[in-house]
Amino acid sequence: MRKLTLTLCAVLLALLVGSALAADATGTWIGQVGGPDGGMTLTFHFKQDGAKLTGTVDGPQGGEPLQIGDGKVDGNKISFVLKIEFGGDTMKITHDGTFEGDEMKLNTKMEGGPGGGGGGPLTLKRSK
């Protein structure tokens, strides 16, 4: 019985330590996206609450930040959606990928908007 109790305590301790060390995306992350004029810098402000991810994205043009929607975190996996409306069109940009430490690697996919499709890889670095 004593051995079973010690084993259960060890497993519980391992679970508590593992959850304390779980990845947290909360913070400011910065990345560069390519473009016809040499690209632009995007700043992501993430807030993680358990598996839920919310936040905003600042573009290079200033103006109103874009709201992050459908954000999820599962371990070191992350996914979220941005919706951009302009000129009567709506562009949906889905992001999914992984993060570890101060680096996040995302795959992006664009739907709608002018020119349709597109996307590609995006690497973000945590701002310190």
Image (cartoon, rainbow, N blue to C red):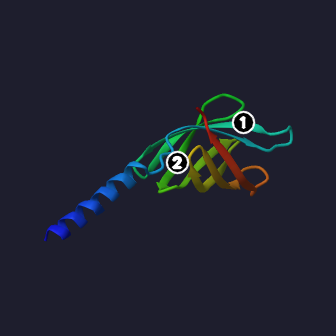
Give residue 117's position: percent from left, percent from top.
74, 58
Residues 44 and 76: in front is 76
Q: Which mark is residue 41?
A: 1
13 vs 123: above or below: below
Quadrant of the image containing the N terminus: bottom left
Tell me whether the residue at label 1 lies in contact with that at label 2, contact meaning CB atoms closer than 8 angstroms: no
Label 1 sits on a secondary structure element that is strand
Residue sitting at 28 percent across and 61 percent down?
Answer: 10
Sequence-first tag of 1 and 2 = 1
Residue 45 image point, x, y percent: 55, 37
The residue positioned 50% from the left and 51% from the top of the image is 71
Q: Quadrant of residue 62?
A: top right
> Residue 69's mark?
2
In the image shown, does 88 or 75 lie closer to the viewer?
75
Q: Residue at x 60, y 56 (%)?
A: 96
Badge 1 local density, few (<14 within 10 Å), some, or many (20+)?
some
Location of the C terminus by quadrant is top right
Tag shown at residue 33? none
Q: Is residue 84 visible?
A: yes
Kindly identify the residue that appears in the image at 75 percent across and 56 percent down.
118
> Is 65 left or right of 14, judged from the image as shown?
right
Q: Is residue 30 left or right of residue 6?
A: right
Q: Is label 2 in a helix, a strand or a loop?
A: strand
Q: Nearer the viewer, mark 1 or mark 2?
A: 1
Identified by mark 1, the residue type is: Thr
**Mark 2 belongs to which amino acid?**
Gly
Residue 89 in view: no
Q: 10 Å neighbourhood of mark 2: few (<14), some, or many (≥20)?
A: some
* Of residues 56 and 121, the one drawn nearer to the viewer in this rendering: 121
Residue 57, placed above or below residue 20 = above
Q: Quadrant of residue 49?
A: top left
Q: How many labels, in total?
A: 2
